[in-house]
């Protein structure tokens, strides 16, 4: 109990309850048991006073609530923890960073809020860095568009794109119209590179809290969170095994806890880019072919034709049912609703080839408050079926080229706003920043 309690709450004062802890340790009572089981049962099992045990449980719960930021500070200091905040209090404390586009802000419920870990995931070229660069500038704006505070950019890959930032300052309709004293500046954007996992951990754990306090940081951007982990733990390939994955999972949990604590205590927004990997699916026609081979192999003597037909129909139905209706609690089925890809009811073959899965797995998903998926799909143009070469007509086999890309901004999950419908909000990357595509224009395309 003592070791478990100090792992969960390292700063918890155990002196008032020192007479209880040895008995709880002897009875193998954990912190989880203390706050979930009935106090009478625990007291009978550990042979300790019920009244003192209830005081310990209440103190542990109050400390947990305080770390999670629940309730009003004044009520908590008076010992009257209610966990209830009025609408006026919530509205007054709600601070967001705008994307500088009304459509994207509406999808996010106002923008990127402080006190939360937000992940922006998508494949290369989807617009992750473009969105993050916009946030670096908008965080310097006065409320409600920004926080009137500086920003910190932590890069694990390419350095900060100052050329693009300068272009946004001079071309964005809102930024270029601001007076000089209210205009964002590159001088208020701190940048640091972390080439490996060791330096990344040191910077986030020790240097980041000091920089936030010293420079008045309101936004921390990490681009990207997965690069160093993938380079460190995927170096050995399959030989690394489960031990490396378990080690990585432990480090991700520690990193998530550290960043959440910084976001809450310092009242800052932490936005991280994440990479994606391809997701492989079993198509129904592949399952059907596998069934037909199994049927021909397991034919029985006697009425062989009838047996093969009945067995084939039964196995075919079972196989199709397995493909269409997978195990509800399996990760392969559940990930459709928290990755950002594959949650639509019907997925065409062309779009099923483009399904992605964010890096770092389910462990990292449990650390973040919100996931935003930037989805891109190609728009093809068909070449002429017959081309003329040296006066001779040649069959071109209907070749297609990618004419351009369409992009969507999709809120996968968030505690303050509903998930986006279907694909989300379509947007474009222009010279003057990100801009959502109107519904009528998107419908025409």
Image: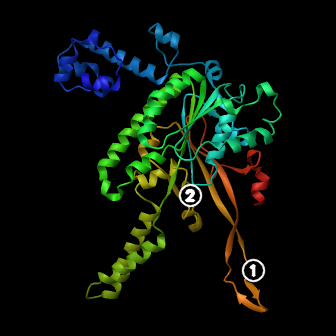
Tell me residue 66's x, y (percent). 45, 19
Q: Residue at x 41, y 73 (%)?
A: 316
Q: Which mark is residue 79?
A: none
Q: Residue at x 31, y 87 (%)?
A: 304
Say which quarter of the image contains residue 37: top left
Tell me residue 430's x, y (percent). 75, 50
Tell me: residue 170, above or below residue 241.
Answer: above
Q: Which element is circle 1 on?
A: loop
Question: Image check: 165 left or right of 160?
Answer: right
The residue beneath circle 2 is: 345
Residue situated in front as seen by the camera: 374 or 213 = 213
Q: Which element is circle 2 on?
A: loop
Within 10 angstroms of label 1, few (less than 14), some, or many (20 or more) residues? few
Tell me residue 217's x, y (percent). 59, 26
Q: Residue at x 31, y 82 (%)?
A: 297
The N terminus - image quarter? top left
Question: Image check: 244 left or right of 100?
Answer: left
The C terminus - image quarter? bottom right
Residue situated in front as seen by the camera: 5 or 323 = 5
Tell me residue 436's x, y (percent). 73, 47
| Dot 1 and dot 2 residues touching (CB under 8 Å) | no
Say which quarter of the image contains residue 314: bottom left
Within 10 angstroms of label 2, few (less than 14), some, or many (20 or more) residues? few
The residue beneath circle 1 is: 384
Instruction: Give whichever of discs 1 and 2 has the lower sequence position.
Output: 2
Tell me: residue 204, above or below residue 437.
Answer: above
C-alpha separation, residue under disc 1 versus residue under disc 2: 35 Å
């Amino acid at each position: 109990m003592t070791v478990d309690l100090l792992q969960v709450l390292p700063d918890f004062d155990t002196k008032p309850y020192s007479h209880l802890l040895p008995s709880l340790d002897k009875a193998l009572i954990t912190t989880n048991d203390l706050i979930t089981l009935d106090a009478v049962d625990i007291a009978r099992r550990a042979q300790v006073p019920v009244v003192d045990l209830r005081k310990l449980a209440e103190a542990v719960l109050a400390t947990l609530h305080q770390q999670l930021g629940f309730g009003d500070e004044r009520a908590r200091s008076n010992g009257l923890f209610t966990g209830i905040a009025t609408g006026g209090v919530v509205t007054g404390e709600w601070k967001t960073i705008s994307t500088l586009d009304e459509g994207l802000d509406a999808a996010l419920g106002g923008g990127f809020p402080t006190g939360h870990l937000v992940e922006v995931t998508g494949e290369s070229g989807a617009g992750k860095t473009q969105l993050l660069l916009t946030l670096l500038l908008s965080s310097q704006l006065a409320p409600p568009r920004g926080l009137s505070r500086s920003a910190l950019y932590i890069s694990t890959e390419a350095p900060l794109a100052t050329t693009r930032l300068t272009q946004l300052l001079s071309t964005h309709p809102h930024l270029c119209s601001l007076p000089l004293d209210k205009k964002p500046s590159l001088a208020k954007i701190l940048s640091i590179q972390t080439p490996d996992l060791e330096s990344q951990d040191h910077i986030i754990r020790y240097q980041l809290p000091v920089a936030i306090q010293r420079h008045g940081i309101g936004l921390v951007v990490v681009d990207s969170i997965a690069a160093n982990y993938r380079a460190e733990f995927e170096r050995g390939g399959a030989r690394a095994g489960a031990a490396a994955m378990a080690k990585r999972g432990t480090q991700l949990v520690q990193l998530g806890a550290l960043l959440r604590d910084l976001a809450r205590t310092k009242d800052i927004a932490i936005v991280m880019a994440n990479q994606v990997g391809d997701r492989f699916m079993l198509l129904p026609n592949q399952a059907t072919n596998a069934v037909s081979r199994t049927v021909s192999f397991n034919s029985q003597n006697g009425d062989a034709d009838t047996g093969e037909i009945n067995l084939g129909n039964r196995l075919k139905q079972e196989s199709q049912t397995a493909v269409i209706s997978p195990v509800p609690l399996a990760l392969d089925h559940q990930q459709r609703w928290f990755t950002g890809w594959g949650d639509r009811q019907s997925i065409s073959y062309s779009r099923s080839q483009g399904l992605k899965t964010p890096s770092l797995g389910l462990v990292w998903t449990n650390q973040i408050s919100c996931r935003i998926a930037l989805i891109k799909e190609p728009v093809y143009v068909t070449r002429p079926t017959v081309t003329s070469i040296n006066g001779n007509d040649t069959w071109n086999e209907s070749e297609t080229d990618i004419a351009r890309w369409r992009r969507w901004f999709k809120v996968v999950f968030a505690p303050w706003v509903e998930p986006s419908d279907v694909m989300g909000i379509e947007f474009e990357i222009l010279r003057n920043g990100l801009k959502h595509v109107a519904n009528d224009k998107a419908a025409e395309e």
